[in-house]
Amino acid sequence: MSSTEDRMKALAEKHFGMDVDIDVSLRDTEISSLDQLAFLKRVAEEFQTAISSVDAEQFENLRALAKYIDDRS
C-alpha cells in the first residue's frame, strides 16, 4: 500500500468508525451518501486538494481516490 492509501484507510476507519477495505466500493457498503460526501470533504481538507463532484462519482473505491490524489500532488 502507498503512503496515501495508508492515510486514506486510516482516515476512513476513523471517519466511519469501522474497518474499511480500500478495494470495496463505498456504494456497496451501508454508508449513507451524505456520510460519503462528508468523508470526501474531509479527504480534500486532509490532502489539501480539490475533488470535484464529477470526479467523485468516478471513484470505484478508496484505492482509486488515493490514486487520484497521488496523481495531483
Image (cartoon, rainbow, N blue to C red):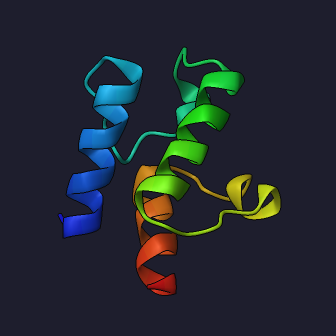
Q: Position of residue 5 (x, y in %)?
A: 28, 59
The answer to whether 44 is drawn above or below residue 15 in the figure is below
Question: Up-down: is 43 above or below 13?
Answer: below
Front residue of 46 and 52: 46
Q: Residue 57 at x, y = what percent?
A: 74, 52
Q: Residue at x 70, y 25 (%)?
A: 33
Q: Is residue 66 left or right of residue 50?
A: left
Q: Position of residue 58 (x, y in %)?
A: 70, 59
Q: Is residue 52 left or right of residue 9?
A: right
Residue nearest the viewer, comparing 42 with 27: 42
Q: Residue 32: image x %, image y %?
A: 64, 18
Which image quarter is the N terminus in?
A: bottom left
Q: Residue at x 29, y 18 (%)?
A: 18
Image check: 41 left or right of 33? left
Residue drawn at x 43%, y 39% is: 24
Viewport quadrant of the C terminus: bottom left
Please determine whether, in this image, residue 37 is positioned above or below residue 56: above
| Residue drawn at 38 percent across, 47 percent down | 23
